[in-house]
Image (spheres, rainbow, N blue to C red):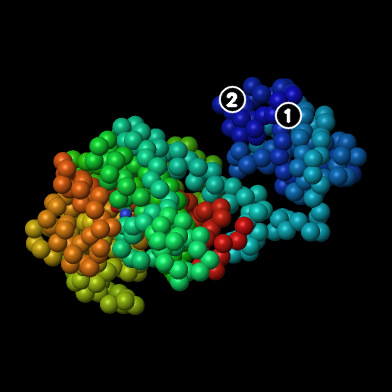
Amino acid sequence: MSRTKIKEILHAKDPSSLAGKQVSVSGWVRTVRGQKSFAFIEVNDGSTLANLQIISEDAETIAQLQTGVSLTATGMLAQSPGKNQALEMQAKEIRVYGPCSAEKYPLQKKRHSFEYLRTIAHLRPRTNTQGAVLRIRSALAFATHLFFQQRGFIYVHTPVITGSDCEGGGEMFRVTTLENLARDPSEDFFGKKTFLTVSGQLEAEIVACALSDVYTFGPTFRAENSNTSRHLAEFWMIEPEMAFADLKADMECAQDYLQFCIRYVLENCMEDLQFFDKFVENGLLERLRHVAESPFAAITYTEAVDILKKAPKKFEFPVSWGLDLQSEHERYLSEEHCKKPVIVTDYPAGIKAFYMRANEDGKTVAAMDILVPKIGEIIGGSQREERLDILEAKIAALGLNREDYWWYLELREFGSVPHAGFGLGFERLVLFATGMENIRDVIPFPRTPGHADF
Ligand code: 4AD
Ligand code: MG
């Protein structure tokens, strides 16, 4: 008999119509309650948060069942007298695949800390929280493609191995086959120094300057030694890039995209969101509805600095025009001052990357960051410098090697267009949508300084 996913049973449009049907489900036992000859078995297959309750009256089978055991159960669905579920199964046959030692299996009934669960990342997906995180993560990835594809953006695959440092931070992992790193890079695999990419933006710009609207969605690497709850050494980034677009269009696209994602999970992941609202962040659903419905605030960097200077709050880091905003400042602006996501624009040129378009004032660039409550920066973007002479001067002033950017400069020489884009840190979006606190808990296999386990 072919397998039915538990979601199809418990989330059926009309569960009562399934009563009396014979089905086969497969999954892992969460709990067994009962006696030798009669047991309630809660089975989960990951398709949905809820377990299917299976009733067995076979003493021989019941004796083999423990938390963690994998099985296939075949039997009749019946309306459940219990108030937790509409349907349950009266098992006719249970086939056990893998036993699971009650003494050794760590995921017994009691709740474990998220920190401990990270040390057992091979079993962590079997917990309610991680299952819900992974389903929402998958839904947000799907919503991302849906949003951009519906708007006619072309999905491009930019390289993971690259020779250029897009963000200019020098926080790159070197990729090499040299045994001795003192050897000349010309002897290396690619005949030069190469790295894992920190952003697909520069390559996305190339394609946008031909296909107009494009987006990337791929793994991104940063060798920054930031042991915070918001940083990973390997994370996923979505980077749309639009030709014939300015900063205003960029801001609109970013807000629409964020709101689309939140609406998508509100419409498609309610069971998991209710779980997070109850056990992880009380008030999550209300917060998400507010984000989905109301327009974001927008202020300039200069206004942000004024607000922070007047804030009735002591910050650890100094606030002064020209200094970068720290996460405590970003959180104050969105959480306490605006009480919603806020787009901060027009940052000082000195604290932003080389490719951002110079503003008329000669001091600021057409940058925008979106800051959200609890997290701070979730999106960073800008209009790009499309004027060849200005970009050349900038590259020279920063002491960058012109040769490394010859193709980037040629894009400004051959049919240059105003264009803009942004990058969204996917794990920060998952944090935002679930209320989870630590970025290590929203990616199945986190990479952070000192940790590349599993
Ligand atoms: O602000 P960032 O560095 O911008 C760029 O990389 C641009 N090239 C984007 C563009 O315009 N196409 O990074 C973009 C976003 C941040 O706002 C943040 O959400 C996320 O990427 N991010 C990280 N997420 C997790 N761990 C890290 N170490 C991150 N660094 C950045
Ligand atoms: Mg940034």
* Residue 80 in picture, x, y percent from top left: 71, 33
Which residue is at a point 74% across and 44% down the rendered structure image? 29
* Residue 325 in picture, x, y percent from top left: 28, 68
Q: Quadrant of the C terminus?
A: bottom right
Viewer-proximal residue among 34 and 423: 423
Q: Quadrant of residue 253?
A: top left
Q: Is residue 10 above or below residue 374?
A: above
* Residue 209 in picture, x, y percent from top left: 24, 41
Q: Quadrant of the N terminus?
A: top right
Viewer-proximal residue among 342 and 294: 342
Viewer-proximal residue among 9 and 351: 351
Q: What is the number of the mark on residue 14?
A: 2
Q: Quadrant of residue 362?
A: bottom left
Quick one: label 2, few (<14), some, or many (20+) residues within 10 Å? few
Q: Is residue 155 above or below residue 313?
A: above
Residue where numbered disc 1 is placed = 24
Number of numbered labels in the structure image: 2
Quick one: label 1, few (<14), some, or many (20+) residues within 10 Å? many
* Residue 229 in picture, x, y percent from top left: 47, 64
Q: Is residue 35 above or below residue 319?
A: above
Which residue is at a point 24% across and 53% down the rendered structure image? 406
Q: Amino acid at mark 1?
A: Ser
Q: Is residue 294 visible?
A: no
Q: Amino acid at mark 2?
A: Asp
